[in-house]
Amino acid sequence: MSVKQFEPKFMKVGVLTAALQELTPREKRDPDPDLAIEEWVAYARELGADYIQLSSALHPSEADIPAEALLDPVANTLDLREPFNKERAKRVQASLDTHRIGISEVGFFDNLLHDDAALRKKKHDYMKMTMDTAVLLGVDAVCGFVGRNQKTNMDQNLLDFEEHFVPLLKYAKERNLVFRIEQCPMPGWVPGDNWHNNIAYTPGTWIALHRICEKHGVGDQFRIHYDPSHAILMGQDTRSLFQYLKDTGYNFLIGGFHVKGQVVDAKGVSAWGYGGQTLDRGDMIDGKPSPNAADHLNAWKKQVVLCEHELPGTAKHDPLAYLQNRTVDWLDHQLAARELLALDPEKTFLIVEHEYPKARIQDKDKLKPILQGSIAFTRRIDEAAACMYALQNEVLAAQGIPIQGIGREAYRS
């Protein structure tokens, strides 16, 4: 009988730079944009991360959504008011080398199916600039949303995707890039009743979208950057979701992870259900979107009335909540990824995304130990899962020794 050596394979741990939007004060970074990247790279090393997911966004002077209307304002750590070029890339790469930090993806999280043709073009042009930046920095992927056309239904949005999003994937293919889609349904992105404002929100839609991509020769460009907080928001559990992808032959779709949790408020669910608060939120005045942009923040009550984001490690260890899919079982998340998905752990990124409201501190010294603890937790959870997987599925299996117990099972109610 063969002997398999114990060789656990660990994932790559990083942090999204939107974790601290104003690390570099705007009066310093507006005239010197790449200073924001340099200071975030140095900060990432202090935090114990090995990678950053470089967040980009339309500059506040160019954005169509005011900051006061955003539940979690996006970060333009990468400032593209002027296109990135080789000189800027050389400067950023020097900082990365000095601090031994890599970049997982360049991220731009916006609505790329916007119903306004002029705004959609503006966002697409910006997305293309992030792709060009990724190439200059030697990064092989970008990350973002698909979005939704608010003037059409979901079936019609499939046509919008084919007409307007597929060309972005072709642009990515020409540059040997992958586009990893985060699956947040974005329920409070706009005033109104739509819950699903990012059509790539669940495996059923991922598969439908991927079939469109395959038809146009860009199937390899479309991948998912899975975030378990959004599964919890929709009543799903990670193991069953991964099992469904495997059962349908699409377990290759997930190519990376946002490590962000969700803690469901049972009282909020009792009041509103998983559809969230549907009326009397304060985002609408006399049946129309409020003229005050700050009121639009209330649209997010669809989500926050029933749950709150978790920074990994900040929520209580709660086995009952794990079994009820009311918070993320991080250990089983990492085990299920190895057991059910078609991925190479050593080439897979775990990107900590910080959206726990009570800890959204815009002070780098106060935030530092919080992020250090969360990143360390993420790394140790992954290491524990990697060790369990290697011991049980490789070492013991090679010698014909059975694994003890049953463990968490997919589709089990």
Image (tube, rainbow, N blue to C red):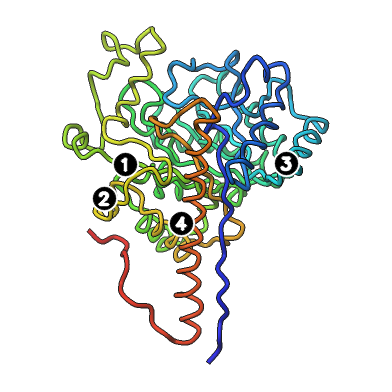
Q: Which residue is mark 4?
A: 381
Q: Secondary structure at mark 1?
A: strand
User: Where is residue 41 drawn, in percent x and y?
Assistant: 66, 37
Tell me which amino acid carries mark 4: Ile
Label 3 – label 2 distance at C-alpha: 40 Å
N-terminal of the pair, mark 2 or mark 1, is 1
**Type of amino acid at the residue the image marks with label 2:** Ala
x, y percentage for residue 329? 36, 54
Specify the quadrant that holds the C terminus. Answer: bottom left
Is residue 3 or residue 252 the one in the foreground? Answer: 3
In this view of the protein, can residue 216 be seen by the observer?
Answer: no
- Work out whether residue 331 or residue 129 is closer to the camera in this orientation and state it: 331
Q: Which disc, if any, is residue 96?
A: 3
Are dots 3 and 1 in contact, CB under 8 Å? no
Which amino acid is tagged 1?
Answer: Val
Q: Secondary structure at mark 3?
A: helix
Up-down: is 321 above or below 284? below
Q: Which residue appears at 33% of the width and 21% of the height?
A: 192
Q: Earlier in the sequence, mark 1 or mark 4?
A: 1
Question: In the figure, 187 relative to 327: above or below?
Answer: above
Q: Quote the CA–CA distance across marks 1 and 4.
A: 18 Å
* Residue occupying the point 57% across, 79% down: 5
* Residue sitting at x 53%, y 36%: 368
Label 3 Cα neighbours within 10 Å, binned few <14 / some 14-19 / many ≥20: many
Q: Compute the Cα span from label 2 to label 1.
A: 9 Å
Determine which residue is flagged by label 2.
321
Q: Are the residues flagged by discs 2 and 1 in contact, CB closer than 8 Å?
A: yes
In the rendered structure, the answer to whether residue 360 lies left or right of residue 32 reads left
Mark 3 touches mark 2? (CB < 8 Å)? no
Tell me the CA gap for discs 2 and 4. 18 Å
